[in-house]
Amino acid sequence: MSVQGKKILLGISGGIAAYKSILLLRLLVKNGAEVQVVMTPAAKQFVSPLVLATLSKRPVICELAEGDIWANHVHLGRWADLMVVAPATCNTIAKMATGICDNLLMAVYLSATCPVMVAPAMDEDMWQHGTTKMNVERLKGLGFQILPVGKGALASGLIGEGRLLEPEEIYKYIIAHFQPADKPLQGRKALVTAGPTYEAIDPVRFIGNHSSGLMGIEIANALANAGADTTLLLGPTHLKAGDLVHTIRVTSADEMYAAAVSAFGKTDIAVMAAAVADYKPGNAAEQKIKKSDAPLHIDLVQNPDILAYCGAHKTSNQLVVGFALETNNEIENACKKLERKKADLIVLNSLNDQHAGFGTSTNKVSIFESDGNTIDLPLQSKKELAKELVLLMINRLHEKNQ
Ligand code: PMT
């Protein structure tokens, strides 16, 4: 899913956060969108029209009339597939809510026949003010999409709510806007683990494994493409998921566990495809361990089990999917894991099958379900397999929520 060929009006109003609109514009243009920038006069004090015109390859428009040229706001309003106002200051939101038409941005907004997305940015007190809340509610009531605000350092020097979302976050909302409506997982949340974990022995060395993360990444992509709001907890790997997936990079099993525990409660589907180390050194050395003639012993202690946590805490509406990577007694071991970790499904891959398991672009799996059902799938690319697994998950989630 992309913004390729989409016509977007980017409205910029005058606030410190306007600098982020340059990065948003660059993302949109890089991904094939046609962008027309419309600025308020105040926004010119914060970002240079020259930079925006150069990046968008179109003149930036700001005034209703400049010299003997009149900007045709009606044409612009009808030209666009989407209008994004980012940043939308407190003042611009107030004007939008009341229809005050005292600059070109407002004239274009009032002429727009396309959907409008608003990314607010202001100081916390202004964001919390009853008047702003009323204006925001009014815009929502008119059918406009109001994006959330971020929390952090504000222009005033205070810390709080009101920051403009990061350009990448706004871009994700824009992509989601252009998704086809027939998304079976729209409104659902998915959590996926992928990749290896690294367990520190000392500051230099770790215990790890050969997982590339690809299997879990493809599952996260497939879930996101099916409309799920997808979070991927990704161990150390050079691979990355698509733009629709919210990726959280982690290193150790403890970090992955903590992130999973905090996300699991709100999750509809949890898929544990990571190769999590079962053990970690009990005490990682603070300094690099020096070589000596004596044998080196490292005491290992067990890591928390993320899949077992999800299985133990799942409600009857949540679907929990685990993987099993086996080298011997594959079916028996996989079925034991299904039962012990209280998963709904276990996807078994064996290192005895060629081109399956770690580090390959393909995989061959068998699925074991808690009701005794078994499905054998042929060798196929991890991308295709992920799509097939997600179809199965959609069916199972549907059955649980009937
Ligand atoms: O990343 P790739 O190179 O694409 O390879 C894909 C894969 C082989 C890693 C993947 O298909 C796979 O099999 N992942 C699970 C690997 C594994 O660790 O299996 P396991 O049998 O040890 O663990 C069973 C299940 O418990 C898994 O869902 C695992 O994520 C989970 N687990 C294990 C230990 C732990 N501490 N926490 C867990 O959640």
Image (cartoon, rainbow, N blue to C red):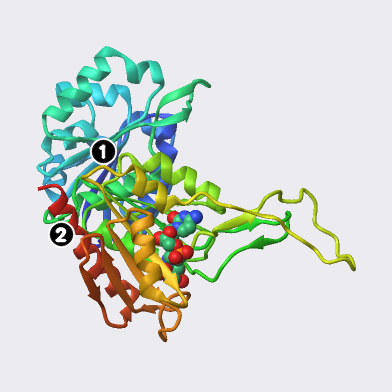
Whether residue 86 is visible here, answered yes or no, is yes
Snapshot quadrant of residue 62: top left
Q: Which numbered disc flags the more N-terminal residue, 1 or 2?
A: 1
Give the residue number, with chain letter if any, for mark 1. Answer: 67
Query: Left of 297 or right of it: where is 97?
Result: left
Q: Is residue 390 above or below residue 37?
A: below
**What amino acid type is highlighted by mark number 1?**
Gly
Question: Residue 150's spot in the image, x, y percent?
Answer: 40, 33
Q: Is residue 43 left or right of residue 392?
A: right
Residue at left offset 40%, top offset 36%? 18
Q: Which residue in the protein does label 2 denote? A: 395
Q: Residue at x 68, y 50 (%)?
A: 282
Q: Picture coordinates of residue 195 (x, y %)? A: 48, 63
| Amino acid carrying mark 2 in the image | Asn
Left/right of residue 237 with respect to residue 141 in the rendered view: right
**70 and 255: which is toward the camera:** 255
Residue 384: image location, x then y, percent: 27, 74
Mark 1 to mark 2 CA distance (whole Å): 62 Å
